[in-house]
Amino acid sequence: MDIQVQPTILFFDSGVGGFSVYREVKKLLPDYQYLYCFDNEYFPYSEKSEEEIIERTLKICQHLDQIYPLDLIVIACNTASTVALPSLRKYFSIPIVGTVPAIKPAAEKTITKHIGLLATKGTVKRKYLSDLVDKYAADCCVEKIGSTKLVELTERKLHGYPIDLDEIKSELVAWEKMEDLDCVVLGCTHFPLIKSELQQCLPQVTHFIDSGFAIAKRVEFLLRDVKVRSKNQIINQVFCIKPLLEGDGLRKLIYSLGFEMLNLLNI
């Protein structure tokens, strides 16, 4: 009897923040085939030009699709999602799922109508985001913090290094005394991975909201009746662009998430 081959999904990010999205999708769809690629050579994308982000994202996704025929790509990076989705959708015929800051759910959940949006510098300055706020949270006061430092601290944590809570607090000092701030949108896929630290720094906030579960439901819907492109089973694996340092704690995390191999992608 032939084994039914499950769809292959690629998660792409500049770092390993996209693991927060992968976790939600894997929880909902445990038997699918998963690839994860992080462009650690160009991390963080929030400090790169739009042209560089589009070129890198498209090039790497194309390269992996040639090796492992993909059924869906998740751009598990808010910064890349704000600029690269049109180019990807033009090239690929498979579904491309981006990550959108959860402005709408936060606007529905807030009692005080005072929301915080925590994202990267690249995300907070783009018209894409202001359009989301205008559409879904026009009746709310939306505070914005764009932080590269928090992204870098999250990466440190996931690579197995200790992080200082005071460094996180210093990035959030503008919100420290906003007592009626009751919802914070985690507008970068890295930030759910430091949610416990953020809760300690902002105890007045009732809800920290990310888009991970919504993305998982979207992936489930898009692949419900998919005709799988490859008949080959593959192992779940992670790709990086630049070699990791010896003893990097990220390897342990990768295996704990259900991946069986870490590979260097020559591109």
Image (cartoon, rainbow, N blue to C red):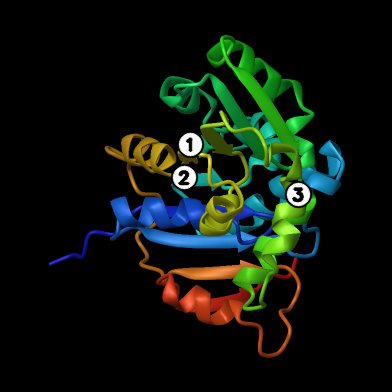
Q: CA distance from mark 1 to mark 2?
A: 5 Å
Crowding around mark 3 (Cα neighbors within 10 Å: few <14, some 14 to 19, many 20+) is some
Q: Position of residue 80 (x, y in %)?
A: 69, 41
Amino acid type at circle 1 is: Pro
Please tell me whether mark 2 or mark 3 is closer to you in this view. Answer: 3
Whether residue 19 is visible here, answered yes or no, is: yes
| Disc 3 element | helix
Q: Residue at x 36, y 67 (%)?
A: 233
Whether residue 67 is visible here, answered yes or no, is: no
Q: Residue at x 82, y 37 (%)?
A: 50
Crowding around mark 1 (Cα neighbors within 10 Å: few <14, some 14 to 19, many 20+) is some
Above or below for 234 versus 183: below
Q: Quadrant of residue 267?
A: bottom right
Q: Which mark is residue 31?
A: none
Residue that badge 2 annotates: 72
Q: Which mark is residue 171?
A: 3
Relative horizontal placement of residue 39, taking residue 98 as reference (left or right): right
| Disc 1 element | loop
Q: CA distance from mark 3 to mark 1?
A: 36 Å
Residue that badge 1 annotates: 95
Q: Position of residue 160 (x, y in %)?
A: 62, 78
> Cβ–Cβ below 8 Å for labels 2 and 3?
no
Q: Position of residue 94 (x, y in %)?
A: 49, 38
- The quadrant in which the N terminus is found is bottom left
> Cβ–Cβ below 8 Å for labels 1 and 2?
yes
In depth, the one of 62 and 24 nearer the eye is 24
Please tell me whether mark 3 or mark 1 is closer to you in this view. Answer: 3
